[in-house]
């Protein structure tokens, strides 16, 4: 099995290591594929200010650095250029044409923010627990089910808008709410997930099994949960494994756990990215999105 990580952050955004350091670590740790996915700059007019998005004035340098690494590591690592682009209705979405000129290999679509319609208040669902609790009080009067519904509504909107290749940490909203771990979710939450999957399976989009929370010790399970994976299998939604790496130590982190969860959920194969064009050869996945290659789980 080829090991890959397409969800990787560097010092260009909120990662701890440089592109070259991550390439070297990936090579030493036996990865075949490494994709860089900086948090894309948000539109200035959004008024949202963070210290973890790639700055607009650093975007060109990021692109150049990844392209340089592609050439330097050719023949040893397959390196790809990506962005993780936030979906905020009416403000930002992975389908935005503002990134079209950069010849990206792939895009990860993610929902991190819940906001008031006028953006006068916003919070990230995976920030510190205090931010999550304050945000739910402010926007949803303390109603966690309402916050979950808003999150999944945003994920559905992102999927419907399209323009991306991978759904990032699809059930990220559970991070700070332990009552939703281990599939301990209310029926309303399950219905929201089902509505997303009903839309998702009709589109050429891959869902990542993300080990980022395990790598950082913030949660004892993958994104998505085993229960959601079982539902995804029912719809034959393709999956890939990503570390959501923010340091060299995260690469391949807890992949054995992800494989075990996938197998217990009924999956027997994943897909790995082979490039923009339809991959050829005995592993070519005729059912999946173009450019992805099926791999049997070990």
Image: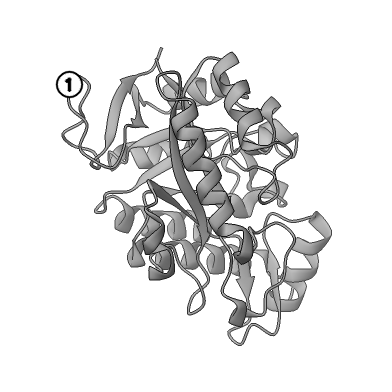
Q: Which quadrant does the C terminus fall into?
A: top left
Residue 27, relative to residue 67: is it above or below?
Answer: above
Left of 231 or right of it: where is 35? Answer: right
Relative to 21, is 6 on the left or the right?
A: left
Looking at this view, name the residue that lies furthest to the right: 130
Q: 153 or 119, which is in the foreground?
A: 119
Q: Residue at x 58, y 33 (%)?
A: 243
Outermost residue, top direction? 298
Can you see residue 285? yes
Q: Which of 58 and 243 is in front in this view?
A: 58
Chosen colour scheme = one colour
Where is residue 10 drawn, in percent x and y?
A: 65, 42
Q: Which residue is drawn at 72% across and 71% down?
A: 49
Residue 251 image point, x, y percent: 61, 27
Left or right of 45, for residue 122: right
Can the viewer see residue 39 in this picture?
A: no
- The residue furthest bottom is 118
Q: How crowded is mark 1: few (under 14 residues within 10 Å), some or many (20 or more)?
A: few
Comparing 76 with 111, the one in front is: 76
Question: Which residue: 28% across, 50% down?
Answer: 201
Q: Mark 1 points at which residue?
A: 281
Q: Is mark 1 on a helix, strand or loop?
A: loop
Residue 25 image offset from top left, x and y in percent: 63, 22
């Amino acid at each position: 099995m080829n090991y890959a990580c397409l969800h990787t952050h560097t010092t260009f955004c909120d990662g701890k290591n440089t592109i070259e350091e991550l390439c070297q670590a990936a090579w030493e740790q036996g990865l075949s594929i490494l994709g860089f996915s900086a948090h894309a700059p948000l539109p200035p007019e959004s008024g949202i200010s963070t210290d973890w998005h790639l700055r607009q004035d650093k975007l060109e340098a990021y692109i150049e650095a990844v392209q340089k690494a592609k050439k330097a590591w050719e023949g040893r690592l397959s390196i790809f250029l990506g962005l993780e682009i936030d979906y905020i209705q009416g403000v930002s979405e992975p389908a935005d044409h503002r990134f079209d000129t950069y010849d990206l290999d792939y895009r990860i679509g993610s929902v991190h923010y819940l906001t008031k319609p006028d953006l006068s208040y916003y919070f990230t669902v995976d920030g510190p627990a205090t931010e999550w609790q304050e945000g739910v009080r402010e926007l949803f009067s303390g109603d966690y089910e309402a916050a979950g519904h808003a999150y999944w509504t945003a994920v559905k909107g992102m999927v419907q808008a399209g323009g991306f290749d991978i759904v990032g940490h699809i059930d990220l909203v559970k991070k700070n709410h332990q009552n939703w771990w281990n599939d301990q979710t209310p029926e309303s939450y399950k219905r929201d997930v089902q509505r997303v999957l009903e839309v998702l399976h009709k589109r050429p989009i891959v869902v990542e099994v993300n080990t980022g929370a395990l790598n950082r010790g913030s949660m004892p399970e993958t994104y998505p949960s085993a229960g959601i994976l079982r539902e995804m299998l029912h719809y034959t939604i393709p999956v890939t494994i990503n570390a959501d790496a923010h340091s060299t130590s995260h690469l391949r982190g807890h992949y054995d756990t992800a494989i075990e969860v996938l197998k217990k959920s009924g999956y027997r194969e994943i897909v790995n990215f082979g490039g923009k064009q339809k991959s050829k050869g005995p592993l070519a996945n005729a059912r999946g999105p173009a450019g992805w290659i099926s791999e049997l789980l070990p």
